[in-house]
Every structure is written in structure tokens, then in C-alpha cells.
Image (cartoon, rainbow, N blue to C red):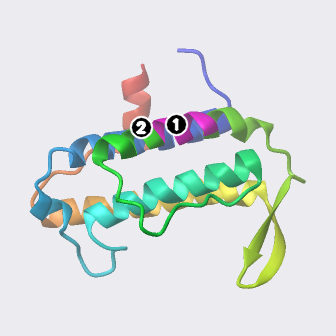
Amino acid sequence: MKPDDTLTTLFSHNLWANLRLLEQCAALSNEQLNATISGAYGSIWDTLQHIVLAEQSYFSRISTGQRLHRAEDAPPLTIAEMMESVRTTGAGFIAWAPKVQAGDTVQIDWDGTLRHVPKTIILTQVINHATEHRAQIMAILTQLGIQPPELDSWTYFDERE
């Protein structure tokens, strides 16, 4: 196995972990998908939607500099659509992350104030955001008596070999 650069490894793991979690959640019942626990973002379903839509938004900022506009009344994504979306954004982050330079910024309306946010901060947010919410879903799965998938980097390493 040829070693990847650091950013490729980080974003490849993020893609792998998102897909692995979505694959497990595809087998859940509607009742299970609607389960939540105190301290979580929301139900498994709501949290999966949140992860996927956030990654779409982050990728739009990184690749175009523009905010992603999604209609408020747009229907929720299906599990299949979420999987396709994370494949697309995941591949996009793998391609774009190494190109981002320390001084690259994007203009964001931050509570009514335009701010120049470093793209490196957005890339950091992609990883942290997904990790936090995947952990919440895994805690809900555990509370349901379902063994969550192993999403750690050691498992990723073993599966790549």
C-alpha cells in the first residue's frame, strides 16, 4: 500500500467512516432511525441529514467560495442519496484539501458581519463536525442495543491493507 499524504489520509478516512455509518444505518427501521438520546444533535435520521448537508455546504465554500443554497422545503435525502452525496463531497475534499493554501479565505456572513474565514478552518470543521456527530449516532445505536461500526483510524488502516 502506497502511503498517502496527510490530508488525503484524513479526508479518505472521513469518507470511509461516513459511508460505513450510512451503510449500517440503511438497515435500521424507521423507529430506530428516529431514536435519539439526551445530548445528541437529534435523531439518527436528523443527524445523518445534518452531517451530509453540512458537508455539501462546506464543499461548496471550499470549491466555489459560495454558500450552498438548498430550498427550505426540499425533501429530506434518502439514505442512498446521502451515500451518493458523501461520495461526491468526500472525493471533492480529497482532491481540494491539498490545494488549499494557508492564506486562502472565503467570505462568510457571520451573524450579519462579513468575515474572511480561512479555508483551512473550514477543512478542520469538516473533520471535527463529522467525527462529533458520528459519535453521537454511535451512542444512540449503543443505547438501542446495536453494535456500532468501528470507525477509528486503526480499523481504517487494517481494512486498507
Residue visible at 37% across and 73% down in the picture: 41
Q: CA distance from mark 1 to mark 2?
A: 6 Å
Q: How many marks?
A: 2
* Residue type for callout 1: Thr
Asked whether residue 150 appears in the rendered view, the answer is no
Query: Could you tell me residue 70's position as x and y percent?
Result: 53, 61
Q: Secondary structure at mark 2?
A: helix
Asked whether residue 144 appears in the rendered view, the answer is yes
Residue visible at 62% across and 55% down in the picture: 58
Magenta segment: 86-92
Looking at this rendering, what residue extends furthest in the top direction? 1
Q: Secondary structure at mark 1?
A: helix
Quarter residue 42 falls in: bottom left
Contact between marks 1 and 2 (CB within 8 A): the answer is yes
* Residue type for callout 2: Glu
Looking at this rendering, what residue extends furthest in the right direction? 103
Predominant SS of the magenta segment: helix
Q: Residues within 10 Å of mark 1 (few under 14, many from 20)?
A: some
Quarter residue 117 falls in: bottom right
Residue visible at 52% across and 59% down in the picture: 54
Image side of residue 132 versus residue 117, left or right = left
Q: Residues within 10 Å of mark 2 (few under 14, many from 20)?
A: some
Q: Circle 2 is placed at which residue position? A: 84
Q: Circle 1 is placed at which residue position? A: 88
Query: Could you tell me residue 148's position as x and y percent?
Result: 22, 51
Quarter of the image with the C terminus is: top left
Image side of residue 153 versus residue 47, left or right = right
Image side of residue 136 versus residue 143, left or right = right
Query: Could you tell me residue 18's position as x and y percent?
Result: 40, 45
Tell me if residue 88 is in the magenta stretch. Answer: yes
